[in-house]
Image (spheres, coloured by chain):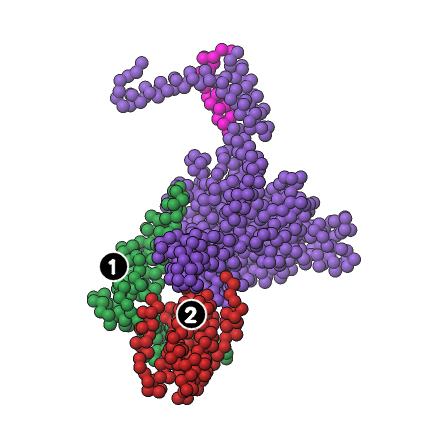
Chain colours: A purple, B green, C red
Amino acid sequence: MESKDLIIGIDLGTTNSLAAAVLDQGPVALRVDGKSPIIPSVLSRQEGHWAVGQEARELRTIAPERTVFSVKRLMGRDHGELAAELPRLPYAVQPAQRGLVKVHIGEEAFTPQELSAEILSAVKRNAEEALGRPVARAVITVPAYFDDAQRQATRDAGRIAGLEVVRIINEPTAAAIAYGLDEGQRGTVAVYDLGGGTFDVSVLQLSEKVFKVLATGGDTHLGGDDFDALLAAEMMRRVQQRQPGLSLAGPLASQLFRKTAELVKIDLSRALETEYRLDLPALGLACQERFTRVEFEALIAPLVDTTIGTCRATLAKAGKRPDEIADVVLVGGSSRIPLVRARVRELFGRAPNIAIDPDEVVAIGAGIQGHLLAGGRRDYVLLDVIPLSLGIETLGGTFSKLITANTTIPAEATEVFTTYVDDQTGVELNIYQGEREFVKDCRNLGRFRLRGIPPMPAGLPKVHVTFLVDTNGILTVSAREERSGQAAAIDVIPSHGLTAGEIERIMDESVAHAQEDMTRRQLVEFRNMAEAVFRGIDKVWDQAREMLGEAELAAIRAQMDTVRRQAVLDEPLALKREMDRLGELTRPLADAIMSKAALQELRRFFRDHGGVEMV
Amino acid sequence: MTPERDYFQVFGLARGYAVDLAELDARYERLSFDVHPDFFAAATPAEKQRAERLAAELNAGYRTLRDEPERAAYLLGLLAAGRALDTRQLPAGFLQQMFALQEQVDELEAAPEPAAKAELGRAVAARLDAVRAERVALFARALAGATPELLQALQSNVNCEKYLLRLQARLA
Amino acid sequence: MAYSNKVIDHYSNPRNVGVLDKSDPNVGTGMVGAPECGDVMKLQIKVENDVIVDAKFKTFGCGSAIASSSLATEWIKGRTVDDAMKIRNTEIVQELSLPPVKIHCSVLAEDAIKSAIADYKRKHGQAATTQQQEQQTQQQARS
Ligand code: FES
């Protein structure tokens, strides 16, 4: 497949991100030289540059206020909604224009979209290196329970990273694709996806050719992060109890506890108890502690029970009983916790399926969907649903649903609006998403202002407003005035997302960044080209010896060494120059061989077609 | 209001109240392969938009024909073909009964009595069954020849179901 | 869309919720429903010397139906019966800025008033129009 046709799948996770694609050998997670395909979703600002991934992760306890993690939890949310979790974060999050928030590091401030874009860029670079060719298009996964604003934010992040986001796809659905196609799973399947920061459960009907989501439920702010926070708080409480004089305030201590909590949590998935050390000489902290699995489970049980409650509700929405579920698939790093597995097993009365690595399965499913979108296959159709009802604000702040949750998407609703005063030329709509009765309990997606209604007496204009939720779960609104047939203009004032202008500005500002990106891509391209050329030369070396003189051969060999030396440096233009020179040196050789090959080709053609034999 | 598109035609099914659901599923599946936007990823933005809208319409059609109350209201709209019906008509005394039943639910919510609630639930379910049985007969006759009287009777029948479903939702 | 405080007040503190004595010859009782959603409403008026002196309603409808009835009952109090007949749901829609999905809720309020007046007139032997005919004329006016 041509690289321009390739569409990779990216799992943009709260804690980890990775890419996958369908290659000749099938769907695979993209890794460089046998390294892990996983890039921690952490980034650290170092002297005007971003360190992303493992490197940034190490910096969490060294430069906590410059190191950003769990960006996904900030996507498409406003300051008020985040109030509960902001105090837990060591970095500064401030309200910005409209509903946006920005992460402040030193003098600089970044939107969650920009930060996610940095992670996506790192994933993209990693994928390009693994594939040995540039990547331009991607399917990006989001939690099924993400609302319109969170989906848009994700798509915008992709754009800022220089990716064409062909499709936004739900994480549990992606996992189901992987199971449906790789494992041949059929029947009614439940996907339980507990990640670092989000929880989703989806119930799907998998048949030979149709993967249909029946219902989905979840919580976009519940995941492994919350377990870590509970554990860290408990660990801190214990230390404090023993050493009441110690002051554990500040990001340094909180990050040390968080990091240790993560390790303890992972240990306790394997062992029944674990020991850990906490050393922070600056604060006079040095201690050795113990934690048991039973203690840990007591801490997290209420949260795990919440997820089980959501599973029950989602099954009901799908019209299924637990015993009608043919298989339960576990996804997400936090699904490794024994208590989670036990509770899931209890609910469904069967052992959950973990045949595909829960860390990779979402990216793999997205990669398969990318393959389908690229036209690589056409043998299944994916029917997903809108996770939350969509509607408008009505009198007294009540919420009127236009499209209800769990409706198959794309879905469309048309409403006819009119004017209330004579010659009114505009109508304003406030759009919300949620399940509650009052808009204050739902998410405000934005205001839509219809303009350009022809002046008429009140009540006469009939403006047909169409709300279309597309396959990505993203809303578009269009309007037409019936009497005049005129398309009414719509101004969209998003409540959380970036406007088109803002995205453009960010992209302009990151021209330097884009250049760097370009450089990387070129480098990858030129290195691959160099390798191809070397292979070509090797192949014809014997013939070359017959055709060229000793001096010419030596010059070629010397230039090949120069190219090799240049290829390990990060200077694509210099590499290109040396490659061009090599090209010149080998031109006579190439010409000679080419014409010979071409001649042979022509001969074969005429022979096969019964033509005249050529001399 | 006359529907813009005949969903029965879209799915290639005979117009009627009884629908072979397996056949409907199979046709929905086949049509999805034709219009789903995922098969138009390489198309122009305008074509993509068209696929989104067509798929949305297909989904709406499938939803309508798959659900009995929706199918009934939709088929009635097709049969009425623009003829004005009294869209609010109900059998005499029906609203009074509904109001009384709603008040009973209120009382049960204030002072829960599970046995009485279950009893009420059964009564509502039985009435729903009767309404649906009547509808099958009415549609059979209306499809043979849609007289204004038959259409109005169907409208009244469809209306009754709405009120009973509302009660049922509160009792669930 | 910012609703005026007055409107929100009709929603959170609906006026005239309750019942009047059905057997009182001066009380007219109307019972209506909205087949769009299956909600029902009872509205009663008390008439003295052809003037509506009191009005009460009870509904199992949504918030918009409650606010519409609250507003409409306030409007008709003190008006003559014939004057009250002139109330149109579009006025309620306008006053409360109801969106299309909620128009039927205002219709419920209008219908309830007319149905109550019809009942009152029936009690007083002046049923000029039957309720049925009335509803049909209203329908034509609306569509
Ligand atoms: S939704 Fe039923 S009266 Fe408003």
Q: Is residue A290 above or below residue C9?
A: above
Q: Amino acid at mark 2?
A: Glu
**Disc 2: which chain?**
C
Region of the chain picked out in magenta, as a range: A528-550
Q: Residue at the spot x=31%, y=77% of the render?
A: C132
SS label for mark 2: helix
Residue closest to the eye, C55 or A173: C55
Q: Quadrant of the N terminus of chain A?
A: top left
- Label 2, label 1: how many angstroms apart (C-alpha)? 44 Å
Magenta stretch: dominant secondary structure:
helix
Question: Relative to A423, does residue C119 appear above or below in the rendering?
Answer: below
Q: What residue is rendered at 43% in x and 45% in y?
A: A369
Indicate whether residue A538 is drawn in magenta.
yes
Closer to the camera: disc 2 or disc 1?
2
Residue A242: mark in rendering: none
- Tell me what residue is drawn at x 55 percent, y 27 percent: A573
Left or right side of A224 for A540: left
Residue B122 on image: x %, y %: 39, 76
Q: Nearer the viewer, residue A595 or A409?
A: A409
Q: Residue B31 at what x, y percent from top left?
A: 32, 51
Query: Residue under circle 1?
Result: B14
Label annotation for residue C91: 2
Q: Chain of mark 1?
A: B
Viewer-side residue, A160 vs A122 = A160
Residue type pointed to by label 1:
Ala
Image-based side of B35 in relation to A447, left or right: left
Q: How many marks?
A: 2
Residue density around tag 2, few if under 14, some if 14–19, many if 20 or more, within 10 Å: some
Q: Quadrant of residue C44?
A: bottom left
Q: Answer yes or no: do the residues labelled 2 and 1 have beta carbons within 8 Å?
A: no
Q: Is residue A592 visible?
A: yes
